[in-house]
Image: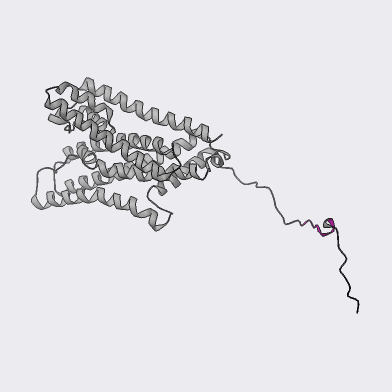
Amino acid sequence: MAVEQPVPTAPGDQTRIHNIGYRNYDGPRLGRSYATRSLYSQSLRGAYGLGRSIKSKVLPMLLFVVMCVPAAIMVAVAVATKAKDLPVDYTRYAIIMQAVISLYVASQAPQSVSRDLRFKTVPLYFSRPIETADYVRAKYAALASALFVLTAAPLIVLYVGALLAKLDFADQSKGFGQGLVSVALLSLLFAGIGLVIASVTPRRGFGIAAVIAVLTISYGAVSTLQAIADAQGSSSAVPWIGLFSPVTLIDGVQSAFLGASSAFPGAVGPTHGEGAVYVLVLLGLIAAAYGLLLRRYKKVGL
């Protein structure tokens, strides 16, 4: 019995065009500012693992708790013993906890920028209305804001506890305000340094190690040199050596202008004249970090 064979058809005979109703978008276009704000808010949330997996929340939330617990203990002791003052000044707290702050920067700066570099998604951002400067500002502001939350939260705990302990309101408010200014400057400086280092490599592990090395090794080296200078009777050199570490730089600014006691060897903090140099160096480093990030992402976005 003969079997009927199907008649082959040309590829063109099987082509169909269907009108599935695609229409052009005619709604409002929110533009650069909205896109920049969205990138800022998402980056800030990501700095604490919000909107991400449980694993991503563990380290930032743990470091946040570690920052706040000592402050809560100090408050409890002050209230229980009816102390006349807090054990630690507001301006000293961040310096004491600088290791925790450095670890937070080291963990979150690469998370903020390294993934975009590793997966080559940076040019996709620039295909939208935002430009290079918008991207850099959003990332910088997000990490600086996250750092400010981390460093200001324990100061709020101290301040509320001081009021509960019925300490002098005027003195505590003044110290609290000085502490907020100090941690705001610290947040801008550390965020800039962390992002510049992290933007060099798409490898998150390398970025973490590099940030820790820069922040901790510089502090250890500068503190050692200051101790040697003080031991050899060169106390005048101690403040100038402090210019070469982010932590001692913040220490010098707040001891010169915010009424803080200096952690330098021999408590030899900078004078007002030397403090002016500290401020110039601090602002110069923040501006330089922003400029380096702009140059870096202009090349990446090409």
Which residue occupies 27% across, 45% down?
100
Name the magenta segment's main secondary structure. Answer: loop
Determine whether, in the image, residue 257 is placed left or right of residue 230.
right
Residue 200, picture quadrant: top left
Image coordinates for residue 292, horizontal then vertical, percent: 43, 30
Position above or below: 86 against 237: below
Residue 3, picture quadrant: bottom right
Q: Nearer the viewer, residue 69 or 163?
A: 69
Which residue occupies 32% across, 40% down?
212
Residue 98 in view of the camera: yes
Q: Which residue lies furthest to the right in this view?
A: 2
Which residue occupies 47% across, 43% down?
39
Determine whether, in the image, residue 120 is placed left or right of residue 73.
right
Q: Count up the numbered dots.
A: 0
Quadrant location of the C terminus? top right
Residue 175, picture quadrant: top left
Q: Residue furthest top?
A: 273
Residue 183 in view of the camera: no
Q: Which of 223 and 64 is in front in this view?
A: 223
Image coordinates for residue 240, horizontal then vertical, percent: 23, 23
Image coordinates for residue 38, horizontal then vertical, percent: 48, 44
Position above or below: 103 against 217: below
Q: Give the range drawn in magenta.
A: 12-19
Image coordinates for residue 17, horizontal then vertical, percent: 78, 56
Which residue occupies 23% across, 26% down?
241
